[in-house]
Amino acid sequence: MIEQKKNFYINGQWIKPSKPNDFEVIDPSTEEICAIISLGSESDTNDAVNAAKKSFFAWWDTSKEKKLELLNNLLKIYQKRSLDMAKAISLEMGAPKDWSINEQSQSGEDHIKTFINQFKNFEFENYLDQEKGNYISYEPIGVCALITPWNWPINQIALKVLPALAAGCTMILKPSEIAPLSAMLFAEMIHEAGFPKGVFNLVNGDGPGVGTQLSSHPDIDMVSFTGSTRAGKLITKNAADTIKRVSLELGGKGANIVFADADEKAVKRGVRRVFNNSGQSCNAPTRLLVEKSIYERAVKEAMEVAEKTDVDIANKEGRHIGPVVSKVQYDKIQNLIHEGIKEGAKLVAGGPDRPAHLNKGYFVKPTVFADVNNEMTIAKEEIFGPVVSIIPFSTEEEAIQISNDTAYGLTNYIQTKDTNKAQRVARQLRSGMVEINGVGFADGSPFGGYKQSGNGREGGKWGIEEFLEVKSISGWE
């Protein structure tokens, strides 16, 4: 059955678009239409912005206690409907059932909990110098446009909406038009939780339409965007005339440096990390840098992981990976796999075309290239699929040089039992995050990158600060 999801959530109610503009949402496991949404027009965008603008001062003035009450309402509703969220994400972007429940949907709940805890302890006012009456006030930046991607849909929605609400901002969410169902479900939760009219609004649309309208709108004070570096550049240019704040979380081409003294699971752990979510994670360690003395063994281990990684449709249970999100993405990945072969990289697992047992759907074989160098296209471009490129290195200095030789700087990874070496290398890597020996980041850690991976931070107190202005007041008695 094809779901009809044509309305937008504006000023506390679901309303019809001002003009018909149907868009088909495709189930990537089957290539069949699973829902029909509407793409908004400039009139719809303006209505949402006006609603957010009118509600801003009242929401800013709402007490911390009331905001916490509403956020806790939202958490309870999300927990009650977490399985619905998982189903929506599986349908719209192809995340396998177990992965969608345990990782995709769970990430939304985790972020709500984390931001509630951060908000409780966040100080919005304090003295810089009480003797001189110098007072600092952290105030909401205003009306925000939140533009989110399809690869981790509710994860990114929660990372933007929750801190914006806590900061006292009002907002318009534009989710990815190819994976909008999770966002619309989230809007239902916001409504049920009892947030005031106009504080949260949702308008579906594409980048050239609603995305451009929001990023250039004179009444939008901030754009928070997660997506491709190409789109991030366009948003920055569109926002320039109004000097609005632009916070960007963009692409990545993470290096995973495996030294000869790494633990025995290091290579397999890194390769699995790339294949998770069908390779559709900006922080995936897609460049596997291996010290030459263990290089042949590492290539064999990577090949074995690829060969043991099952690929299947989203609604099956199990630890397989699903399809990539769309035909556009599938074709891009296939072209880059062909480019890797053409440029001389050694294909040791996977390769072009679908797995043999699947005759439809946007499925990509888990693919491993060896003997890659950093000048090859597959080492430079973000593939955003289950593709690993293995690059040999001889020295610590060479590993650092190769890792930093990229336009991106989101997450890098280090595998070594030598603590001093790990810390020494971590300090020299030009990225917003560095993971050592597979130890995950704590809840509330800042997420964001250097260079063309973006210019803001999401998560924890840094996520709230992103939506605040700092006001200095003298003579405060």
Image (cartoon, rainbow, N blue to C red):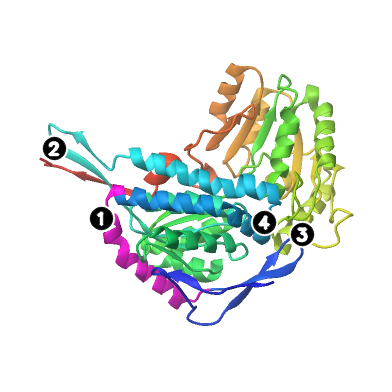
Amino acid type at image mark 4: Ser
Amino acid type at image mark 2: Gly
Instruction: Please report whichever mark, 1 or 3, sits nearer to the chain's N-terminal start.
Output: 1
- Asked if residue 297 is positioned above or below residue 185 in the image, the reply reads above
Where's residue 398, x and y in %? 67, 28
Q: Secondary structure at mark 2?
A: loop
Query: Residue 295's image quarter?
Result: top right
Q: CA distance from mark 3 to mark 4?
A: 14 Å
| C-beta proximity under 8 Å, tags 1 and 3 | no
Q: Nearer the viewer, mark 2 or mark 4?
A: 4
Task: Spot the residue most to the right.
Answer: 356
Q: CA distance from mark 2 to mark 1?
A: 23 Å
Q: Secondary structure at mark 3?
A: loop
Q: CA distance from mark 3 to mark 2?
A: 62 Å
The disc at residue 61 is 1
Instruction: Please report whichever mark, 2 or 4, sits nearer to the chain's N-terminal start.
Output: 4
| C-beta proximity under 8 Å, tags 3 and 2 | no
Q: Secondary structure at mark 1?
A: loop
Amino acid type at image mark 3: Tyr
Q: 232 or 196, which lies in front? A: 196
| Mark 3 closeness class: few <14, some 14–19, many ≥20 residues within 10 Å | many
Instruction: Please report whichever mark, 3 or 4, sits nearer to the chain's N-terminal start.
Output: 4
Q: Which residue is mark 3?
A: 362
Q: Which residue is mark 2?
A: 133
Q: Which residue is mark 4?
A: 90
- Asked if residue 390 is positioned above or below residue 174 in the image, the reply reads above
Q: CA distance from mark 2 to mark 4?
A: 55 Å
| Mark 1 closeness class: few <14, some 14–19, many ≥20 residues within 10 Å | few
